[in-house]
Amino acid sequence: MTKDALKAVLPWVLGLWLAGVTVAGLLWAPAAAGFHGDSFRIVFFHVPQAWVAVLAFCVNLVASIRYLRTRAPLDDARAAAAARLGMLFAILATVTGSIFAKLEWGMFWNWDPRETSIVILLLIYAAYFALRQAVVDEERRASLAAAFAIFAFVTMPFLIFVIPRVYSSLHPNLVEATQGAVRFKMDPGMRLVLFSALAGFTGLFAWLYSFEVRLARVLAARHSREEA
C-alpha cells in the first residue's frame, strides 16, 4: 500500500474504531461498582478527552521550545495547532465531567478540586490565545507565545495531578498505587473499552494535528508565493 493510499484509509479505520468504542461504551461495557446507574459510561469519553488534552499541551510545549531554537514559523504553527486541540479536548473533558457530576452528585458543578483546577488551566491557555491575538508582529508573537507556553505547561502538572490529590475530592479514582504496583479498580471488560477509547482518541488527536500542520504548510506556501 502506498503512502497516499494509507493516508486515505487511516481516517476510515479511525472512524470505525471510534464508532466501535462508542457503541461498546454505551451498550456493551458491564456495569461498574461504585457508580450510580450508567454514569460510569461517561468515563469512556471523559478520561480519553482529558488524556488527549494533556498530550496536546505536551506537544505544544515541545513545539514551542523547538521554535525558540529554530525560529521556524512552522514550529510556531505546530505549537498553536496543538494548543487549539488541547483547549478543545479540555473543554470537552470539562463538559463530560459536568454531566458525570450531575448524574453522580446531583449538580453540574460543585467546585470540586478537579473541577476548579481544570477551570484555572483553561483560563491559562485562554490567555495564551489572547496573547497571540494581541501581538501583531508575527515573529514577536511567536516568541512571546512560546515563552508563555513553557510557563503554562509548568502549571499543568500541579493543576491536573498534584492539587486534586492534595485536597479531598468527590472524583472517583480508578487507579491506585500500592507497594509500587499500579492496580486498576475496574473489571476486564471496562478496562478493555477504556484502553480502546484511549487509543482511539489518541489517534483522533494525531489525525487532527497532522491535518492542521498540513494546512499550515499550505497557507505558508501560498503566503510565500503572494509575496514573491
Image (spheres, grey):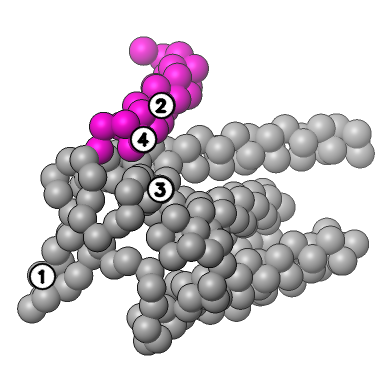
| SS category of the residue bearing label 2 | helix
Residue 141: give x, y in percent of width and height: 79, 65
Question: For this view, does 195 lie left or right of residue 228?
Answer: left
User: Residue under circle 2?
Assistant: 19
**Mark seen at residue 181:** 1
Q: Tag 3's secondary structure?
A: helix
Report the mark closest to the observer, 3 or 1: 3
Q: Are marks 4 and 2 in contact (CB under 8 Å)?
A: no
Which residue is drawn at the image coordinates 23% and 45% (left, top)? Answer: 31
Q: Amino acid at mark 2?
A: Ala
Q: Are marks 3 and 2 in contact (CB under 8 Å)?
A: no
Instruction: Name which of mark 4 and mark 1 comes first in the sequence.
Output: 4
Relative depth, front residue between 105 and 222? 105
Mark 2 is surrounded, within 10 Å at the Cα level, by few (under 14), some (14 to 19) or many (20 or more) other residues, namely: some
149 or 21, nearer to the observer: 21
Q: Quadrant of the C terminus?
A: top right
**103 part of magenta stretch:** no
Residue beneath disc 3: 42
**Three-letter amino acid code of the residue under disc 1:** Ala
